[in-house]
């Protein structure tokens, strides 16, 4: 994965005024990026800047304008995912953005991320009828880890966060809690307690991400929580899987849902092609990746000039696309062999012989017949490790895009507002 990331995840300048048009009859997910946080977490590699009211209001206005550009091109977006940053940083602007999306696209479902301090009536009440899946970035209930991550003062103790989660029980179709495992100072007992607190939180879904970082935040991550090691990652994944098993079932390699399910956390599982709007967003269309500028200033200038935010792209080969389908399918717990052969003109065994041999050698498949592949628990962990490495590569791609930031915005990324 490291070698392939280095080969494939590099960007070229994009000179067109808009994205390529949609495929006939295709449905897309609309990804909306809100790059503002009141305070910045040291481990986060997403495009994010310190919140300032006027700057954020102006940004939301242009974000909605870019959404209109996408609608004018004829994209049929049936699902909407709002990520960040902190999408709920100005709830009125978020509501207006969701309302516009529902009016110009045939949106069936909306997901939005948030933080624990926004689980309050002023933020939650306007979103109940607008958002189907609410995803809360908790990361850990352990007070020592929260302090290491500079989240204790922002969001309160683990017990206080738990109470806030319980306060919104039943208000959304799906309440997801984002967690992180394999912190350098995290013991097995700390992880077990995190999982048990999650189980009593009343959330009907949880996503346990392995700790990962890109080079640009590696230093700040090491200073705050310590040096990342993957030597015990498999053991920790086994622990959390075992403890969750009596209440939750796997929905993807690192997402677990209570019986009855919910919307899967990772939109890339359900939508291979998606359209991104906002500074720092990505689009994946017909085998090519398109990256919007990470600069707030350049984003403003482009939208005001009637251009999309896209400034870079990467076109993938057929084999790259086969490997991406293989990874995303297994991450979603099943690969459709028939669809793979139909779309690529070759069986997965012939198209990806080394990948299939590796997975079979490690007893990764629970079902391996002519129709589909499913995973054993060992296979699920291998999917976690591969996806972790893939996202590290994507974080490296973000670092490439961030190299174009002017000095004043680069300072903002690291939390300096001056």
Image (tube, rainbow, N blue to C red):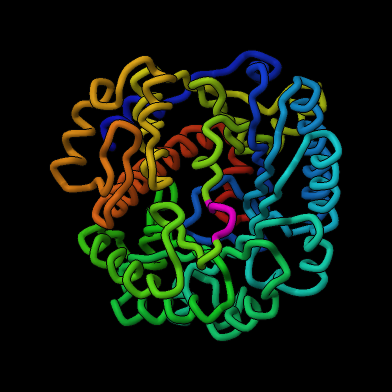
Q: Position of residue 94 (x, y in %)?
A: 79, 52
| In the rendered image, the vertical position of residue 360 relative to residue 171, given as above or below | above
Residue at 39 percent across and 47 percent down: it is 333
Tell which of 258 and 41 is nearer to you. Answer: 258
| In the rendered image, the vertical position of residue 297 relative to residue 34, given as above or below | above
Q: Position of residue 154 (x, y in %)?
A: 62, 74
| In the rendered image, the vertical position of residue 389 relative to residue 308, given as above or below | below
Extreme bottom residue here? Answer: 159
Tell which of 13 and 380 is nearer to you. Answer: 380
| In this rendering, position of residue 237 left or right of residue 76 | left
| In this rendering, position of residue 24 left or right of residue 240 | right
Which residues lie in the magenta part? 261-265
Tell which of 306 and 345 is nearer to you. Answer: 345
The reply to whether the magenta stretch includes residue 295 is: no
Where, by quadrant of the figure, is residue 17 drawn? top right
| In this rendering, position of residue 287 left or right of residue 57 | left
Q: Position of residue 25 (x, y in %)?
A: 67, 21
| In the rendered image, the vertical position of residue 258 relative to residue 61, given as above or below | below
Residue at 55 percent across and 72 percent down: it is 151
Q: Main secondary structure of the magenta part?
A: loop
Q: Quadrant of the N terminus?
A: top left
Total marks in image: 0
Extreme left residue here? Answer: 361
Residue at 54 percent across and 69 percent down: it is 138
């Amino acid at each position: 994965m490291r070698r392939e990331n280095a080969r494939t995840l590099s960007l070229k300048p994009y000179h067109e005024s808009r994205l390529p048009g949609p495929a006939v009859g295709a449905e897309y997910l609309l990804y909306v990026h809100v790059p503002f946080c009141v305070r910045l977490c040291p481990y986060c590699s997403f495009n994010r800047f310190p919140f300032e009211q006027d700057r954020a209001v102006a940004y939301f206005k242009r974000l909605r304008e870019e959404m209109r550009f996408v609608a004018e091109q004829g994209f049929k977006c049936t699902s909407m995912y709002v990520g960040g940053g902190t999408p709920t940083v100005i709830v009125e602007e978020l509501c207006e953005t969701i309302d516009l999306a529902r009016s110009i696209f045939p949106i069936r479902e909306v997901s939005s991320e948030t933080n624990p301090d926004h689980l309050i009536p002023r933020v939650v009440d306007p979103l109940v009828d607008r958002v189907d899946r609410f995803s809360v970035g908790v990361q850990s209930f352990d007070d020592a880890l929260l302090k290491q991550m500079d989240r204790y003062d922002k969001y309160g103790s683990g017990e206080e966060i738990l109470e806030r989660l319980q306060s919104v029980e039943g208000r959304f179709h799906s309440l997801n809690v984002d967690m992180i495992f394999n912190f350098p100072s995290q013991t097995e007992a700390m992880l077990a307690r995190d999982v048990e607190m999650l189980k009593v939180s009343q959330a009907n879904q949880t996503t346990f991400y392995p700790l990962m970082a890109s080079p640009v935040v590696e230093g700040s991550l090491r200073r705050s929580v310590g040096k990342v090691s993957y030597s015990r990652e498999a053991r920790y994944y086994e622990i959390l899987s075992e403890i969750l098993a009596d209440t939750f079932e796997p929905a993807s390699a690192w997402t677990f849902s209570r019986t009855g399910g919910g919307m899967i956390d990772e939109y890339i599982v359900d939508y291979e092609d998606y359209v991104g709007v906002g500074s720092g967003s990505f689009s994946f269309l017909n085998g090519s990746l398109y990256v919007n500028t990470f600069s707030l200033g350049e984003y403003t200038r482009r939208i005001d000039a009637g251009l999309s935010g896209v400034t870079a792209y990467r076109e993938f080969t057929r084999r790259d696309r086969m490997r991406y389908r293989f990874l995303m399918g297994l991450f979603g717990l099943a690969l459709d062999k028939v669809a793979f052969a139909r779309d690529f003109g070759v069986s997965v065994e012939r198209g990806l012989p080394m990948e299939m041999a590796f997975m079979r050698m490690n007893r990764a498949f629970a079902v391996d017949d002519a129709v589909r592949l499913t995973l054993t628990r060992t296979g699920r962990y291998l999917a976690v490790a591969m996806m972790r490495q893939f996202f590290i590569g994507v974080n490296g791609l973000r670092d490439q895009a961030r190299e174009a930031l002017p000095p004043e915005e680069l300072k903002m990324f690291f939390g300096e507002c001056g």
